Image (cartoon, rainbow, N blue to C red):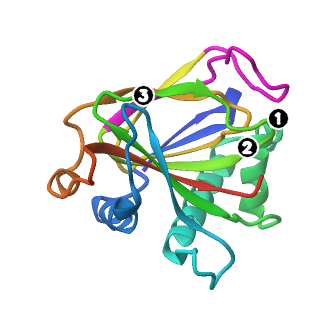
Amino acid sequence: MEVNIIKQYGVVHLKGALTLKEQESLFNEVKDNVRGVGNYPGTSHASSGPPGSSHRNSTLHTLGELLFTRSAEAVVSSLTPLEISSSPSLARLGSAASGAIPPNVQSVTCATYKAGSTMVNHCDLDRPLYTMSVAVGDSCTFTVGLKTPRPYQNENSGPPKDILMSSGDAIYFDGGSVPHCVSSIIPGTAPEYYTRNKPKNNVVRISVLFREPC
């Protein structure tokens, strides 16, 4: 697994976070929930609620918390304590790595993309929303940092950074504070397990979003 940290925005890119087998297992957990609406991303619920509740898929929560932990370990092994404390997003991972505040995935949703679709640049909230995004299917260009037209006070923007996000990659970021968008889908890049068993509605990419409480 290769790690790339964008300190300015508190973004951690885990390249190859999931093996092909792990990707396929995740795909099988969520594919029946996906939907597509026109050329815009469709969103769907995958899991939420406390352990034992009828809407919770514990397999997904366990995976999300594992990826938060991997990101936290990468951050504390790559950055100094001062660098970590300079970013609320990275500081959150620091507290996870120390055990002070363990990862806590509250909800899991899916954003699905048809061929040629994009996601407009935006921030999700007017407050932090620590998110782990995992890609399944076609690769995309995921852009962070581009200023939004009407920014919230908490927005952290500046020079945009493009990330090539391939199937099996995971990106940790603060979706409430860091502007983000999907500027392009790269056709024909999905793994074989995906192409032989595509979801309905011509969905070529699924972004599985693991989120902590906001």
Mark sitting earlier along the chain (3/2): 2
Q: Secondary structure at mark 2?
A: helix
Mark sitting earlier along the chain (1/3): 1
> Between tags 3 and 2, which lies in front?
3
Distance CA(mark 1)–CA(mark 3): 32 Å
From the image, give the main secondary structure of the stretch colored magenta. Answer: loop
Give how far across and how far down residue 103 sits, in percent. Answer: 69, 64
Question: What segment is highlighted magenta in the picture?
Answer: 139-159
Q: Amino acid at mark 2?
A: Leu
Categorize mark 1 by other alpha carbons within 10 Å: few (<14), some (14-19), many (20+).
few
| Towards the viewer: 117 or 136 | 117
Q: Can residue 143 be seen in this snapshot?
A: no
Q: Is residue 155 magenta?
A: yes
Give how far across and how far down residue 121 sits, in percent. Answer: 57, 24
Categorize mark 3 by other alpha carbons within 10 Å: few (<14), some (14-19), many (20+).
some
Q: Secondary structure at mark 1?
A: loop
Categorize mark 2 by other alpha carbons within 10 Å: few (<14), some (14-19), many (20+).
many
Q: Can residue 52 be seen in this snapshot?
A: yes
Distance CA(mark 2)–CA(mark 1): 8 Å
Q: Which residue is mark 2?
A: 90
Mark 2 touching mark 1, by CB under 8 A? yes
Give how far across and how far down residue 88 sits, in percent. Answer: 80, 41
Q: Is residue 112 above or below residue 45?
A: above
